[in-house]
Amino acid sequence: MQVYSSSLKREKMKRTAFKMILKPGCKQEYIKRHNAIWPELKKLLSNSGVSDYSIYLDEETNLLFGVQKLDGEQSSQDMGAEEIVKKWWAYMADIMETNPDNSPVTIPMEEVFHMN
């Protein structure tokens, strides 16, 4: 019997969601940097099984909401050992709330409903 990762819906790909915190006044810079995401970072994410990745912004709270599908166990937030990820985190650190290692402060979210 195959075990699926989503407890709400049986599917091959796992969905994951998380919140991050954008510093006030940094919306346009955040968009600009992500519109020019480094090809080698995008390749690493894709090769690691991350797909259908979107980030939304709640402008009232400056909370970023990330959602992605995973074909594996590592989300984009679990790749901090990779040099390109460390560089990206350092590049983004001036516009986001971060941990001491420059990784974004990330708050996992629990899926409570899904509909295909």
Image (spheres, rainbow, N blue to C red):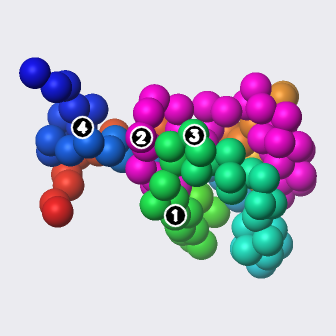
Q: Position of residue 96 (x, y in %)?
A: 77, 52
Separation of residues labelled 1 and 3 (CA atoms): 16 Å
Q: Position of residue 32 (x, y in %)?
A: 79, 75
Asked where in the image residue 95 lies, by quadrant, the reply is: bottom right
Asked where in the image residue 34 lies, by quadrant, the reply is: bottom right
Residue 27 visible (yes or no): no
Is 116 on the left-hand or right-hand side of 37?
left
Q: Nearer the viewer, residue 8 or 63?
A: 8
Separation of residues labelled 4 and 1 (CA atoms): 19 Å
Q: Nearer the viewer, residue 77 or 40?
A: 40
**Mark 1 element type:** strand
For the record, the magenta segment spans: 66-95
Residue picked out by circle 4: 6
**Nearer-N-terminus badge (2/4):** 4
Of the two numbered discs 3 and 4 in the rendering, the one whose residue sits closer to the viewer: 3
Separation of residues labelled 3 and 2 (CA atoms): 8 Å
In the displayed structure, 116 sits above or below 28; it is: above
- Mark number, residue 33: none
